[in-house]
Amino acid sequence: MHRAVAGEAAALTVLLAHSKAHLQVYLSRKIPPGLRRTVDIDDILQEAQIQAYRHIDRFTPRGPDSFNRWISAIALRRLRNAARKHRAAKRGGGKAPVVSPTGTFESSVVALLDLMAGSDHTPSRSVASREAVEAVQAALSRLPEEYRQAVQLVYLEGWPVSFVAATMGRSERAIHNLCFKAKNDLRVLLGSRSRYLGCSE
């Protein structure tokens, strides 16, 4: 690993070859059933290896398995990108997510605030979007890791619950529960009478 980071091409080639079997198993566990017929694991694996090759200088060895963890994170991002493209090309076929994958992070935060406020209020309409984004980001950072990850993937990035469940290694019901608890905690962190939730102080 250290020789690869130092720029030795032969060492990096060997390192990538040794990681291939790990990546194949990792991706086969992460890919949602609905994408198995449309997304080629080998293509994702190759893209991850190419990116790792180009950006090996960003990798810092931290133990025997650190390279596998690093390239797995790259592969997971490539898989998410492939899933996003698949969803963008798909017409209809199910309930739309709270936020469109083509939307901005700012619009995603607005949609999440609207969802938490319920039908009686229109929170973000009267709040500066930038201010709302900063408030939500600060609140998210205080959530337990699993809560934050679930609400980030489902509501801010717009991934299907089935994909998030596969990514996090949880059941779909568990993801729904995590999101429910995360939204409740966010309400508390933002303030139950906060103008972000459409309520007066």
Image (tube, rainbow, N blue to C red):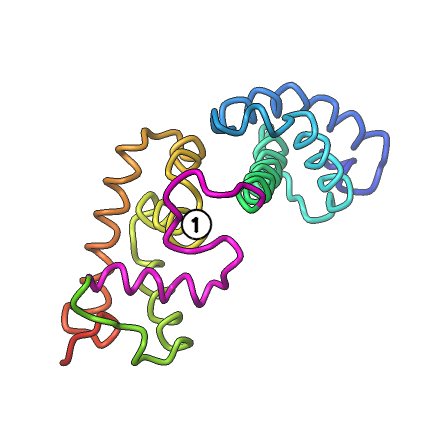
* Left or right, 69 with reference to 48: left
Q: Residue at x 34, y 30 (%)?
A: 170
Q: How many marks?
A: 1
Q: Residue at x 40, y 51 (%)?
A: 152
Q: Which residues are magenta?
A: 89-118
Q: Is residue 74 magenta?
A: no
Question: Foreground residue, 92 or 165?
Answer: 92
Q: Residue at x 23, y 60 (%)?
A: 116
Q: Is residue 115 magenta?
A: yes
Residue 120 rendering spot, x and y as whole percentages: 16, 67
The residue that disc 1 covers is 158
Instruction: Give the secondary structure at mark 1.
Output: loop
Q: Where 11 sits versus 55, above or below?
A: above
Q: Where 62 sits versus 11, above or below?
A: below
* Left or right, 86 with reference to 59: left
Q: Where 90 sits versus 38, above or below?
A: below
Q: Residue at x 42, y 47 (%)?
A: 153
Q: Quarter holding the N terminus?
A: top right
Question: Foreground residue, 44 or 5?
Answer: 44
Q: Quarter holding the C terminus?
A: bottom left
* Left or right, 188 with reference to 104: left
Q: Quadrant of residue 56 in the image? A: top right
Residue 75 rendering spot, x and y as whole percentages: 61, 36
Q: Quadrant of residue 108 in the image? A: bottom left
Residue 42 rendering spot, x and y as whole percentages: 68, 25
Few, some or many residues within 10 Å of mark 1 (<14, 14–19, 20+) = many
Question: Foreground residue, 114 or 8?
Answer: 114
Residue 50 rendering spot, x and y as whole percentages: 76, 38
Q: Amino acid at mark 1?
A: Gly
Q: Quadrant of residue 15 in the image? A: top right
